[in-house]
Amino acid sequence: MLLVTCPVCHASGDETDFHFGGQAHVARPATSNPEGISDEQQREYLFTRINPKGLHFERVRCDRGCGKWFHAARDTMTMEFKAFYGITELPPDHVIKQAKGAWAEYFTMRMKKQK
Amino acid sequence: MLKPRYSIFSLARNAMNYHKDWERAWRSPSPKAEYDAVIVGAGGHGLATAYYLAKNHKMTNIAVVEKGWLGGGNTGRNTTIIRSNYLQDPSIAIYELARTLYEGLSQELNYNVMFSPRGVLMLCQTQHELRAFQRTAHANRLAGLDCRMITPAEVKEIVPIINDDPNCRYPILGAYYQPRGGTGRHDAVAWGYARGADDMGVDIIQNCEVTGIQRDGNQVMGLETSRGVIKTKKVGVVTAGNVSTVMDMAGVRMPIESLCLQALVSEPIKPVIDCVVMANTVHGYMSQSDKGELVIGGGTDPYNNYSQRGSFASLEHTITALIETFPIISRLRMLRHWGGIVDMTGDRSPIIGKTPVDGLYVNCGWGTGGFKAIPGSGWVFADTLANDRPHKIAEAFSMERFTEGRFIDESVAAAVAH
């Protein structure tokens, strides 16, 4: 049983109080450029998933609490949560540093964009 | 190098000698420097692929590498249900091929896989579900499958322990029945294919984890493993829940998420149910093993998981549903409970075929229902690998379908929605 804390209303509960919404930080390409997207981009958005053995970032909804969506960083081997953070936020820096593979690439790209 | 065949006579002969002289079912060879093809993953699908590569395509200079032990993943963790009554034509084709091969598999492999066509019942517990299964029934009849809708009275006759109270929360409104479906012995399927493949010269290398995929340009050149580099120009990745991590080594991102699916068995009891019952609406399925244990499965846990351990909440959900359906089991004690990591695709259908990397093939995405497909999956994947083009049945299951929007949507027709 996973124990989750909502970063919005700060309520803690076990996993049945929350709803898991899959991979975090998936941007819909059609939002910014509805005409210019290719079939490949649409596939990436809808189906291709980062599916790491280790640190993963996912969306969670505070189902029986405030109802807000938020983000969680969790290890898929140990099930340990590393951080809970807001839906518009990036994970804390020390967690980003632990990201590997496709997630590390993603955060590097996001950091570049922010600068 | 033919092995002595198993028979009633070999059994009697060995019984005389306290079973001390049985020969090993397969060798444990060290990897050679180079093979014509290497299969990654010695589960049912991987071993079946190797078997049919050797048997149908005469490729015997091949190896199967396995990070743990043979058949120790989902092949040994499923609830052994075999059926082929899916909704879409491509699914019907591959699952029915598999079911048909299961019928003759014990003879084919000279290994008792205990295929037991005891019948599979899929309950209809809402009007919507009843209509959905009627639609599947029509699709299956057009495809020539031997399946039919049955009435609540017939359900009660086939499964006397079922709760047929018309006033319960989810009353039985009928069922979709495939009498030729049933169960098999999951370990024996892996062991039988392993023994058969080994017999034809296939090297099955256990405790050999793949750590890298070597490429020259876009062509696969070999595998880096915990037991050294193995050169090969054809690699078939059949690693179920771990497919994303293996494909990552070749730089291919998969449309897959790995989730935990749990199952459990009860203490052994006298025979109470002689078919398989699946209850989609309430999320659970049950059959009874030859040892008398009730074999129980349900839906997946809701989040990515590689740990092969699930959460009690999902388990409780399944048990609650089955106690409502079979009140007789409410006081049974549970004997064992485990989890397996299943590879889920967006449309709940598998991916079989070539990849953007030359010489790299993939057979994955079987999700929660791979056991039933093992012989058919191995058959078409071996053909795909040997001829470097998709087998006719595998064509529809290519990875490109996610780009082209040509889905094989089985999320509704699955026995239990995940």
Image (cartoon, rainbow, N blue to C red):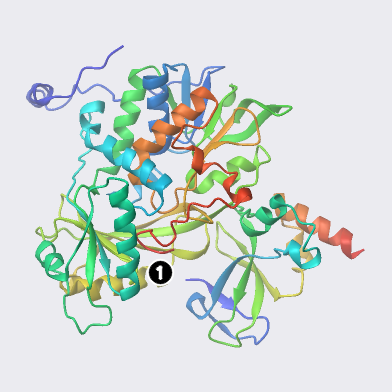
Can see residue B222?
yes
Q: Residue at x 73, y 64 (%)?
A: A27
Q: Position of residue B29 (x, y in %)?
A: 43, 21
Give the chain letter at badge 1.
Answer: B
Tell me if B38 is positioned left or right of A59 in this view. left
Tell me if B294 is positioned left or right of B14 in this view. right
Residue furthest out toward the front: B142
Task: Classify A84 as above or below B399.
Answer: below
Which structural element holds mark 1?
Answer: helix
Q: Position of residue B382 (x, y in %)?
A: 45, 28
Tell me if A83 is positioned left or right of B380 in this view. right
Q: Looking at the figure, which quarter contains the C terminus of chain A?
A: bottom right
Q: How many marks?
A: 1
Type of residue at label 1? Ser
Residue furthest out toward the right: A115
Residue furthest out toward the top: B1
User: Residue B49 occupies which quadrant of the picture?
Assistant: top left
User: Residue A49 occupies which quadrant of the picture?
Assistant: bottom right
Q: Position of residue B330 (x, y in %)?
A: 20, 74
Label 1 crowd bin: few (<14), some (14–19), many (20+), radius 10 Å: many
Q: Position of residue B46 (x, y in %)?
A: 43, 34
Q: Residue at x 59, y 25 (%)?
A: B228
Residue that badge 1 annotates: B314
Task: Classify B231 as above or below A113.
Answer: above
Tell me if B205 is positioned left or right of A100 in this view. left
Can see residue B84?
no
| Of residues B413 and B109, the one drawn nearer to the viewer in this rendering | B413
| Of residues A20 and B400, the one drawn nearer to the viewer in this rendering | B400
User: Residue A21 occupies which quadrant of the picture?
Assistant: bottom right
Task: Classify B114 as above or below B406.
Answer: above
Q: Residue at x 14, y 56 (%)?
A: B274
| Of residues B403 and B8, the one drawn nearer to the viewer in this rendering | B403
